[in-house]
Image (tube, rainbow, N blue to C red):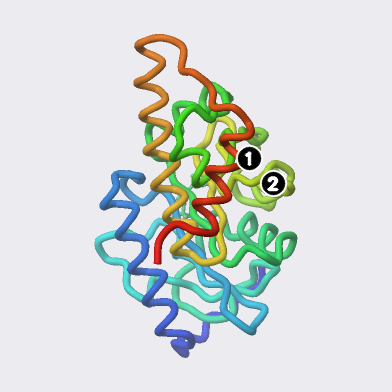
Amino acid sequence: MTATLTERGTHREQRGHVARLHAELTRYGLVTWTSGNVSERVPGEDLFLIKGSGVSYDELSWEGVTVCDLDGGVVDGACKPSSDTDAHAFVYRSMPEVAGQVHTHSPYATAWAARAEEIPCVLTAMADEFGGPIPVGPFALIGDDSIGRGIVATLRGSRSPAVLMRNHGVFTVGPSARAAVKAAVMAEDVARTVHLSRQLGEPVPIAQEHVDALYARYQNVYGQ
Ligand SMILES: O=C(CO)[C@@H](O)[C@H](O)COP(=O)(O)O
């Protein structure tokens, strides 16, 4: 990556929005210390915004969010961007419909990732948000685009906006950073509930036709 640190402070409003969304990760207990990150495309520009690497959540303001090009190069910002920048960049280049991404190590979902086991679709809330099981992606080392390749290979053609990257954690995508945050919150919620259910016995799958109907209603009718 070519770093050009100008500190001009471009895109301050959207960087502030991305910074504030990180508070949802701590609010829902999805991250510990400085793990995890949120990114979002800049509308109309070949750029995205991503948390600075290792920046404390308590201190995160717009200045802790770095502007990058779609190759992961720094365009503006004082912070070295997230370790996952090349992974996010690969996803943005490969999936034009994705405008926001989130990574967490939320404990229940990451426990499924550690076992490389997909979360079966046994809750209506899963059918609603994920349209089926939450799939497992391959093992990938951190720091280059390997994680991004695994995310794209797993989520392309899937209805799920979340993937459990093996031995690592949760990566979610969405039409905005907020939507990707929501998917990360929901992924942890269902990972916990399905885990609890399995302590009591074998959860009962939902018939595919019902999964399809639930997904269609939630995606097209639910809410305002
Ligand atoms: O697990 C990873 C690396 O994939 C990250 O979530 C780190 O835990 C936080 O990295 P930064 O975004 O702060 O560089």
Give the structural element (helix, strand or loop) at label 2.
helix
* Disc 2 within 8 angstroms of ligand 1 (CB): no
Q: Quadrant of the N terminus?
A: bottom right
Residue 14 x/y as whole percent: 44, 79
Tell me the residue that label 1 is attached to.
141
Q: Looking at the rendering, which quadrant does residue 138 occupy? A: top right
**Type of the residue with mark 1:** Leu
| Image point (29%, 51%), residue name | 26
Question: Where's residue 52, x and y in %?
Answer: 45, 64
Mark 1 and mark 2: span between their CA atoms?
7 Å
Read off the residue under disc 2.
146
Q: Give me the disc on residue 159.
A: none
Q: Residues within 10 Å of mark 2 (few under 14, many from 20)?
A: some
Please report whichever mark, 1 or 2, sits nearer to the chain's N-terminal start: 1
Q: Is residue 166 left or right of residue 126?
A: right
Query: How many marks can you see?
Result: 2
- Percent position (x, y) of residue 31? 35, 46
Q: Give the amino acid at mark 2.
A: Ser
Q: Quadrant of residue 23?
A: bottom left
Query: Which quarter of the rendered picture does the C terminus lie within?
Result: bottom left
Position in image of residue 46 (x %, y %) = 67, 78
The local crowd at label 1, few if under 14, some if 14 to 19, many if 20 or more residues have their Cα within 10 Å, is few
Q: Indicate whether 90 appears above or below 108.
A: below
Q: Secondary structure at mark 1?
A: loop
Q: Are marks 1 and 2 in contact (CB under 8 Å)?
A: yes
Image: 26 above or below 177: above
Q: Residue at x 36, y 51 (%)?
A: 34
Residue 165 seen in render? no
Q: Could you say which quadrant of the image residue 154 lies in?
A: top right
